[in-house]
Amino acid sequence: MSSSDIFIGETIGTAVLILLGGGVCAAVTLKRSKAQNAGWLAITFGWGFAVLTGAYLAGGVSGAHLNPAVTIGLAIEGGTKWSDVPLYLGSQLFGAMIGAVLVWLTYYGQFRAHLTDPEIVGAHSGEDGMVDQASAPKAGPVLGIFSTGPEIRHAVQNLVTEIIATVVLVLAILTQGLNNEGNGLGTLGALVTALVVVGIGLSLGGPTGYAINPVRDLGPRIVHALLPLPNKGGSDWGYAWIPVAGPLIGGAIAGGLYNVAFA
């Protein structure tokens, strides 16, 4: 597998993953979206289909890691060269940022309608009908489209939740390689992984929103910070280390568990 294969496959696959995953979050969240308030089931299945599509696109090119936690797990397991890891991670982050920008472009009108509505942003209109920016909330009402956040902010619990969920994901992916001769996910593996992601979202996603992928959270969070969105508030950088560190730790643990229990 060449460096260009890794870059192209991981960039395109991760961009599509974030476009469809972030897209379902935008569809459920934003004012004047036909899917507004569709709920948690729509989000979990939307992310599952996002993984499925990205994996199918990139599987034959780069192996469709699409996730630094998967790359780390595969490197520890031995299926990925450590020398290729930086290229995988950089390509995934780049693709995630592209995908987040595409979500913004796709829902551009809905973002404007949502973030200029006083009822949504919590601002008050003055006598001239203009939004009073001073009274707008500090936290952005659309950050959840781009990145994850906890329902109860407790660093240890949030970190442990992300570690546990990622161990499940990466271990499920690594064990598929037992029947796939180590050549990546394969078509059936991509479907199984998508269903695992849906299961994780339904069962383990409640506390933190199940990032289970560092670039899924970090790339879009960077884009949120950079985009010219009115009333967007902060990007919650104080929490941002948890959905990065947790999945990386989880991926490493899964790789070790695989070597102990399945190798």
Image (cartoon, helix red, strand yellow):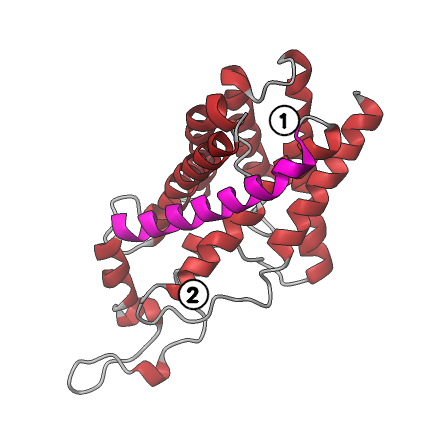
Please give the count of numbered marks on the rendered protein. 2
Q: Which residue is at the front of the view, 213 or 137?
A: 213
Which of the image's four quarters has the C terminus?
top right
Which residue has dot 2 on it? 225
Q: Nearer the viewer, residue 73 or 171?
A: 73
Mark 1 packing: few (<14 Cα in 10 Å), some, or many (20+)?
A: many
Would residue 89 appear left or right of 22 to someone viewing this image?
Answer: right
Q: Is residue 162 visible?
A: no
Residue that sits furthest to the right in the current view = 260
Which residue sits at x=38%, y=39%? 20
Q: What residue is disc 1 on?
A: 173
Residue 21 colored magenta?
no
Q: Classify 126 as above or below 205.
A: below
Percent x, y of residue 150: 58, 57
At a point 79% along the width and 31% down the height, the residue shown is: 257
- Amino acid type at circle 2 is Ala
Q: Main secondary structure of the magenta part?
A: helix
Q: Secondary structure at mark 1?
A: helix
Residue 94 x/y as whole percent: 46, 48
